[in-house]
Amino acid sequence: MHMAFERSERVHASNLTIQAPGDSPNTDGIHLQHARNIFIDHSRIMTGDDCISIGHGSSHINITRIACGPGHGISIGSLGIDGENETVEDVHVSDVVFTETTNGARIKTWQQGGKGFARNVVFENIRSEGARNPIIIDQYYCDHKHCTDHSSAVKISNIRFENIYGTSHRKPAVNIACSKSVPCTDIVLSNVHLEAAGDGDGDGDDGDEPSTHCANVQGHAMGHVFPPLTCLS
């Protein structure tokens, strides 16, 4: 990791440039852990992992005016590794551009039966320029070969994705995969428009309509949402 704010309060990080090759593993730009009242703004982050990762014990986080890419986007988590009780709450991410990133706005929790919560999160005013997964909630995160479902999971609730537009390089453009035992609740998508990014390889799939995936989620869609999520009323 390039920078980490751990067990920190009232930090303002601004006007930063962080750069590493896009294929360099585990090169997070900024990592937060047990951090409160953190402001990160007006920065450009180009790495081989998360531009900003928000870990356990973090709350009242404000991230704005960030250019991210290459990288894995801005991620909450992963939370709940080895069944741990981990929490993140009160996060506001706004005015971000994701350029050719692996993910965009992401929340990820481990599949191995964690506990705790990620709640009260807003991602808004975001532009995706060819991100592969512009909007993603993944409660089945696992970087090992053998992972199994458990009856417990980190609870994800009160999450809003608002004013998110641009292009996606991969289907589904919106992927909300939540736990069967602990579904996501109060998930809101408002004014979202994501087109398929043409790959220019001549195979005729440029401009295909992007798809969505949605499982075990409760919430609703507001305003214009494209591509539509049938699981949200």
Image (cartoon, grey):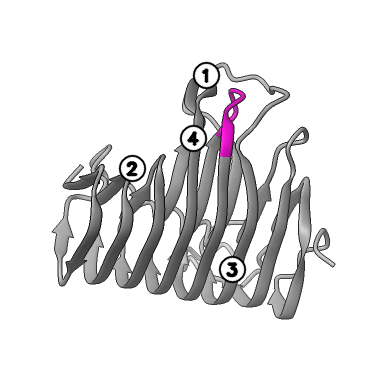
**What distance separates the C-alpha of mark 2 from that of mark 1?**
29 Å
- Mark 2 or mark 3, earlier in chain: 2
Q: Amino acid at mark 2?
A: His
**Residue 160 appears left or right of 14:** right
Q: Residue at x 57, y 62 (%)?
A: 203
Of the residues under marks 3 and 4, which one precedes in the sequence?
4
**Label 2 vs 1, first from the N-terminus:** 2
Q: Measuring 57% from the left and 70% from the top, which residue is drawn there?
A: 206
Reading the image, the residue beneath label 3 is 161
Q: In this picture, which residue range is highlighted in magenta? A: 110-116
When the figure is inspected, residue 65 is found, relative to residue 121, above or below; the finding is below
Who's the residue at 78% across and 55% down the image? 218
* Image location (x, y in percent) of residue 13: 19, 64
Q: Amino acid at mark 3?
A: Phe
Residue 140 counted in the magenta span: no
Dots 3, 4 in contact, CB < 8 A: no
Name the secondary structure under disc 4: strand
**In this view, 87 is above or below 213:** above
Percent across and percent down for residue 162 are 58, 75
Kind of residue at disc 1:
Lys
Q: Which mark is residue 86?
A: 4
Which residue was labeled with disc 2?
Answer: 34
Residue farthest to the bottom? Answer: 223
* Mark number displayed over residue 145: 1
